[in-house]
Image (spheres, rainbow, N blue to C red):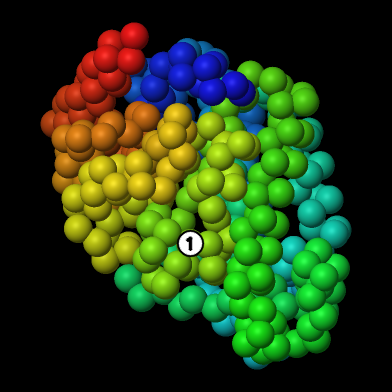
Amino acid sequence: MSPERIASQEIMIGPYGASSLKAASAFHSAGANAAWFHGFDDASFAACDRFDLAACVEFPTFRADFSRRPELVPIGVDGQPIRYGDLVQGVCLSNQDFLAEIEANLRNGIRQFKPKGIWFDYLTYAGWFETPQPDLQDNCFCRSCIADFCQTTGIDADTPLQIIAEHGDSWHHYKRHKIAGYARHYASLVHEIHPGCIIGIYMCPWQPSEFDGALGRIFGQDYHLLADSVDVFTPLIYVYKSGREPSWGKAYLEASDRFVPPGKKVQLILDYLDFPGSLEKTARSGVASWGFQMYGGGAIFDYGEQIDIFRRSAEQIRLMWQDRAILQE
């Protein structure tokens, strides 16, 4: 989608999660016009069609159940499979069978459903950031991954320790470009089938300088390298899970012009666990989010007071975008 076309799109607001669509008849009156849900789910698309909602897919890229697919566990600097629990995601990027599965699923889903938007999730190297104390492990050092690094860079290295000790900057540069290359490939594939589809990406919510540059160093996500492929950047602002303050989303937005390329949209995904504080502070940000998603947001529609808060916040953000559009004319 061209920058001009995404700029003309109405901002998108709504809950994340297929279960939220049980309340879809109330979305528009609450200020919501979209829904995000996992995968190409027939029932969710049908509900969106019925209630005139923009259907947006969260597409799991490099995510797998390691207990079922142990061959996908990345190798760490010590030459062993990385430590992981239930939450760590990201796979060995040399597993061609898995990558072929991902691409086939993406092609088939886009061709069948043609969603309003698709948001790539876990389009990163392995790790986890929804915790106050992240276990940050540099990874993807199997023999095939090392061989690809050497072939790509012209560097002669044999072991993870040698790469980190002697070629660390080149390794982390390689990782950022590797993720950006997958983003270009997947975005091109989507637009080949469905040119009007909005491309979003769920981002590690850290600013580039946090945790010693872990956004790029560990996860391989780089706003500037991704910008040609992505219309909307969506950082996961999960306050309670990450041990942050309710003003985190507001602060992120107001700092975003320092690291998000001009003209690119930032749309936060907030967590119902943090409702209403995180949303209300986000709505008062001096820099508006391009709408918002609410993870687990279906629960908001169970109570009239919550719906009112959601509606007021949506109205505030829409007014900010309208004012911005007037200023740019």
Q: Answer few, some or many: residues within 10 Å of disc 1's Cα (few below 14, many 20 plus, some between 14 and 19).
A: many
The residue wearing badge 1 is 215
- Residue 96: image location, x then y, percent: 85, 59
In the picture, residue 266 is in which quadrant? top left
- Residue 271: image location, x then y, percent: 32, 48
Q: Is residue 287 above or below residue 82?
A: above
- Residue 49: image location, x then y, percent: 54, 15
Q: Residue at horizontal 79%, vertical 54%?
A: 99
Say whether residue 178 is left or right of residue 256.
right
- Residue 82: image location, x then y, percent: 62, 81
Q: Is residue 249 above or below residue 14?
A: below
Q: Residue at horizontal 37%, vertical 30%?
A: 290
Q: Is residue 255 above or below residue 219?
A: above
Q: Secondary structure at mark 1?
A: helix
Q: Is residue 196 above or below residue 109?
A: above
Nearest the eye: 251 or 115: 251
